[in-house]
Amino acid sequence: MNRYEEWLYSHSPAFLQSAFVTFAGARLAWHKYRHGYESFRSEIEATQWYGPKEMAAYQGKKLREVMHHAYTSVPFYRRVFRRLGLTLDDIRTTADLRKLPVTRREDVRRAPQDFQAQDIKRSNYLVRHTAGTTGKPLLILWEKRAIMREYAFVARHRSWGRVLPGDRHAHFGGRSIVPVERAKPPFWRYNAAERQTYFSAYHLTNANLPSYVEKIRQLEPLYVQGFPSSIHILARFALDHDLNLPATKSVFTSTETLLDNQRSSIEEAFHTRVLDRYGQTELVSAITQCPEGSYHINSDYGVVELVRNGENAAPGEVGELLSTGFVNRGTALIRFESGDTARPAAGDCECGRNGLPVIEALEGRVDDYVVTPDGRIIGRLDHVYKDLTSIVESQIIQESPERLLVKVVPSQRYTDAVEAQLLAEVRKRVGDSMDIEVRVVSEIPRGPNGKFRSVVSDIPTPFKWKEAA
């Protein structure tokens, strides 16, 4: 939304805000279910059952299409091929990818236009921004056909949890759909286009949670999806207060690392299983959990390399994810470093999807909560700088119950106006009761394990959670 639309939305009554949400949902659905959705959905319904040899052949075919597109239409890779003296015949299988260098996030952040396809008209793509695990904002172009492909893969994963498109569901996400200063319910808005009730992730207090529970009971969603931290807060509150939540077909989590104690509480509260999904705004890889509990690399979505010290990580070793996507041609990315890590596993899964390799665990994307003075618990805040591409890197630190420090590594385009916008976005989530300092720094230190954390806090949550043993 532009600023006028944002102002209009924030000053409208709840029923009209739901109408806005429905309109946005209908517009997205229009993109999701066109451009050959049914045909592509049938294709990936079949490819999930491919064996390793069939999948290798499928990946080789898709990879050659990606290479031809990159070589003919993407400036960065055209220069790479010429500099290394490579032709398209040199990159025909996944093993040949090692002939190409890793694409660093900094390369994309510094010159996003170099990765944008020159053969796609402006009317055929959408602009997206992402911060990811590293907190470094990137500008990404989604080819409109990529929206269909992405949601076809999402729908396939939903089907693993017995969910159909159009099933009534509850969603906990990062959009600011309810003004942060609102003190009384409803803390949710209804998207009639997709039968989705969108719950605010920014109003989860002890005082407000009973209304969330009551709404979930009234709604009786067939499934729940969203941030594991937000769903966990609701689940833990219900369990600790002996409040029954309706049973659902499945709960789908994404965006954050799903912790074991979160999974246990959510599954107990909703009387179902949690199926987790890993993906990125860059649309280069997808890792999804099957009903057997295994995490599968979606090899028909893209090529994922797990690399340790320049070599393939062995089962059980932690490897960096390097991804080459098949889904999106708008911003083409080959051997892209996501900043996330995972441990490959040995053997196949009992679910029978043997062409989709199994990993033991995802290692990236662990954030802390921010706890506001009025008791709201906010599990993810990277949305505040997703659109601020003049910020190289940022980190939010809660120093006390009343104080947040926002560290910013600026680019040359960073201005006072950008800082004011950043402050406004943080205030939109945490309210006016906290002291917020934005501090410009030259670099942000990593933790002992070398990982970047976009939110850091030593403030305990006000809930006395009974963690699983």
Image (cartoon, grey):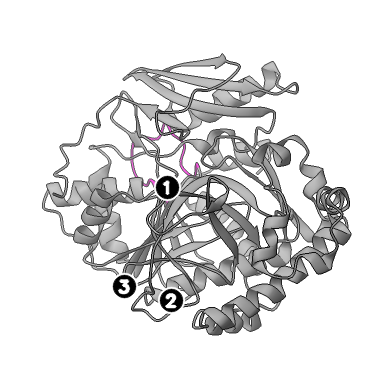
Q: Mark 3 or mark 2, which is nearer the start of the sequence?
A: 2
Image quarter (top left, top right, bottom left or bottom right) of the N terminus = top right
Principal SS element in the magenta part?
Answer: loop
Q: Residue at x 75, y 23 (%)?
A: 413
Q: Residue at x 29, y 69 (%)?
A: 248
The foreground one among 60 and 327 is 60
Q: Is residue 325 magenta?
A: no
The residue lying furthest to the left in this view is: 242
List x then y, in percent, for residue 386.
60, 38
Residue neighbourhood size for the residue with mark 3, other residues' Cα within 10 Å, grouped as few (<14), some (14–19), many (≥20): few
Q: Which residue is mark 1?
A: 256
Q: Mark 1 or mark 2, which is nearer the start of the sequence?
A: 2
| Circles 2 and 3 in contact, beta carbons < 8 Å | no
Q: Which residues are magenta?
A: 176-188
Q: Nearer the viewer, mark 1 or mark 3?
A: 3
Is residue 38 placed above or below 378 in the rendered structure? Answer: below
Q: Which residue is mark 2?
A: 159
Task: Identify the mark at residue 292; answer none if there is no mark.
Answer: 3
Kind of residue indicated by mark 3: Glu
3D distance between C-alphas at marks 2 and 3 = 14 Å
List x then y, in percent, for residue 134.
54, 37
Task: Identify the mark at residue 15; answer none if there is no mark.
Answer: none
Residue 370 in view (yes/no): yes
Q: Which of the 4 image quarters holds residue 314? A: bottom left
Q: Residue at x 25, y 32 (%)?
A: 461
Kind of residue indicated by mark 2: Ser
Q: Is residue 182 magenta?
A: yes
Is residue 14 placed above or below 373 in the rendered structure? Answer: below
List x then y, in percent, for residue 132.
55, 42
The foreground one among 89 and 400 is 89
